[in-house]
Image (spheres, grey):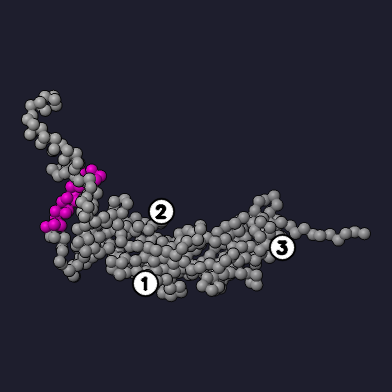
Amino acid sequence: MPKLLIRRLGRGALASAVAVAALSAATGPAYAGRTIHPKPPQSSTTVLNKDGEIASRVETTTSPEEPGSKPITSSDTTWTPPPCWYEPFTPEEFDALLLAKYYKAGADHSGTVYDYYYQIRSKMEAIHYHKGDKGSWLVLVRNENLPPGSAAPCSSTTSWQWTGPGTPPPPGPVITAKMLSDVAYGATKLPSRQVTLSPAAGNQKVNLATYVKFDHPINPVWATAQLKALNLAATVVAVPSSLHIDAGTSYADPQSCDYTFTKSGAAYQVDSSSAACNITYRKATTGSGPYTFKAQITWAVSWTPTATPQPGAGVRMNDGYSTSEQPVTVQEIQAVGKPTS
């Protein structure tokens, strides 16, 4: 049947049909009478993240990480980083945002979503996106710096809203420097540094005091979150404050000790060689396997509304914790007998 149809077409009509077919193949399928374009124009601005969601413009930077650094553990077990917030966009930025979502739906051949953004853009074009008006579009964005499983779901339901003079914002958090401090806190990673034991962890002795220190002093850690478009920033600084150690067994006297960090240049150190508290093991590990020696560093955390780290300055936040473990082998001290005559 297709061959018969082509045979009846004139050369001009056939050329037109081929051109239409080629154009349809190039532009993609159509939905509700409109052709979905798989690629946006070269001049369009991409404002979506890798998952195709509206991207937050908050940027985070951190101090260099030691190997084995892990996300901060807050002393407040109920604390979670903010999952989402509203960021202000200019009418021009909001126009580019909706255009990016429109073309993303087209590239994904998602007809329902494509139609939705077609209708939204038609309504916005009718009011010119409020271009020239005083105010901004508050757009719901998600925290791009969340460790997996670290935050509650976003409870806000309004995706965007125009907010002019005297217009209340949508219900939900609007980005502030204080909120940026929570973003920076959640992006902070602390070193899980093992302490150096004397005698060594693999050669502990019964009834001999165990001294602890770090092989080199620990530097403060910082993280900055900023929204340059609004000139908003917050920097969180964590300073090592105290060290808690646990022998990992009841066969020790005492079973735990606490020390305060002292400043060593720009860093901080613990050295228990002259401290009043030092763990002493009372039973060898022979036949039972090594004890698990635990060390926990408490970090004093504060933040300032700047993009510059300022250790010890600003508003206090929840303390942070970092922990490490290491196996300890304890041996009996071998007595040296006096030779008999």
The amino acid beneath tag 3 is Asn
In front: label 2 or label 1? 1
Q: Splitting the image into 4 quarters, where does residue 18 fall?
A: top left
- Residue 128 horizontal/vertical position (percent): 13, 60
In this rendering, does residue 117 appear at all?
A: yes
Label 2: which secondary element: loop
Whether pointer 2 and pointer 1 mark residues with C-beta atoms closer than 8 Å, the reply is no
Q: Label 1: which residue?
A: 306
Q: Splitting the image into 4 quarters, where does residue 186 fall?
A: bottom left
Q: Earlier in the sequence, mark 2 or mark 1?
A: 2
Start and end of the magenta stretch?
A: 107-126
* Extreme-front residue of the structure: 11
- Residue 25 horizontal/vertical position (percent): 19, 39
In front: label 2 or label 3? 2
215 vs 41: above or below: below
Label 1: which secondary element: loop
Label 3: which secondary element: loop
* Extreme-right residue of the structure: 341
Q: Quadrant of the C terminus?
A: bottom right
The amino acid beneath tag 1 is Thr
Q: Main secondary structure of the magenta part?
A: helix
Q: Earlier in the sequence, mark 2 or mark 3?
A: 2
Q: Label 2: which residue?
A: 148
The verdict on residue 117 being magenta is yes
- Residue 117 horizontal/vertical position (percent): 19, 51
Who is closer to the viewer here, 215 or 121?
Answer: 215
Q: Residue at x 30, y 61 (%)?
A: 57
Q: Residues within 10 Å of mark 3 (few under 14, many from 20)?
A: some
The amino acid beneath tag 2 is Pro
Q: Label 3: which residue?
A: 207
